[in-house]
Image (cartoon, grey):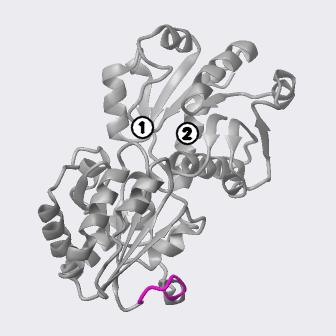
Amino acid sequence: MLADHLVQGGLETHVVTLVNELTKLGHEILLFTASISPQVLSQITPSKFKYLNWSEGSLKQIEKFKPDIIHSHPFTAIDKGREFAIHFKKPLIVTMHGIYDFGVDDSPLGYEVSKVLKRIIAVDYRVALYLLNNAYQPEKISIIRNGIDFQKFYPKAGDNRLLSSLGLNPANFTISVVSRFDDDKELPIIQLLKCSSQLSNFVKGLNLIIIGDGGKLNDVKKAIPTKVSSNIKIKLLGWQENIEDFYRISDLVMGSGRVALEALSCKIPVYAMWDGFGSVITKDNHDFIMMGAAFRQLSDDELIFELAKVVNQRSFLQQSARESYEFVRKAYDSRIITEQLVRVYEQYRQ
């Protein structure tokens, strides 16, 4: 399995979950990346697993591993996967995680990759639709959703000691925003922070936790108001390995993609937020939101009005969390998702 730089985020969690589930099934995995953070590597179960860095690994070491399938994730790893597929005469599978078509598009590289590429896996409808319109060989596209590890993400009472340790009031309504600060995902977070003082006027006590990292971290820091009322407390944190504990202390999580699925697996309501603002995720709008079709730009006044209304609809939030939890448990079990992937592997295994 190949990838570029694995730091911390949705793609990384996808790879970690996939590797762990595949090794549980008895498959041996060699992960070959440009780099990987110690935090990400530590999350992988060592049994039946080997890791090699691009700068240290060699074709001889990979040949000794005797791979049956070459599975690449974006970006440069797709071209490396092509080279390995040719050298070892093995099938290439590519998973695409976002709105991009690098290595599978109508280009010289896309032509070369297509010669050994057997399947393009999109992680959701949004990615699949983009690839259908842009991939060189769209007939090779199929959807295998992001899988969630329900052994890690499950309903459990939040620990108020964690809130207290952060200097937050456990009696307050707690909103956790979880996102990478890049690719315009930081923009709605910055707007939310700028509106946070006014928002707190409509809520009887508010904790606002911002969790994430990325190239626009300084922009996010600058947006934190220097003067706020005693009615609100704001905490900015980096990526948290025990992110499930932060979901569980939240009354509402704001995020998208894997963040939304993980929080819903803990039976916490989610207000979808990506490069714009969506709505509370329910069983009825789930697919529409996960396709990325629901996000819109709001003025400051519209945002304050929208979130004040959401925060004060406690029974609706609890209902949305219950119904979404049941749906996510049915559709996103990482064990079932991994079995789907294995069946794809078996179609092309020589």
12 above or below 269?
above
Q: Amino acid at mark 2?
A: Leu
- Nearer to us: label 1 or label 2: 1
Q: Amino acid at mark 1?
A: Gly
**Circle 1 sits on which residue?**
98
Relative image position of residue 333 (x, y in whole percent): 49, 56
Where residue 88 sits, quadrant-wise, is top right
> Which of the numbered marks, if any, corresponds to residue 341?
2
Q: Return the residue nearer the eye: 148 or 13.
A: 13
Q: Residue at x 49, y 73 (%)?
A: 246
Can you name the residue that lies furthest to the bottom here? Answer: 171
Q: Tell me where the magenta segment starts and ends, as one range.
A: 164-169
Left or right, 220 with reference to 346:
left
Quarter containing the N terminus? top right
Where residue 38 sits, quadrant-wise, is bottom right
Relative image position of residue 326 (x, y in whole percent): 36, 66
Where residue 228 sits, quadrant-wise, is bottom left
Relative image position of residue 7 (x, y in whole percent): 61, 48
Left or right, 89 with reference to 312:
right
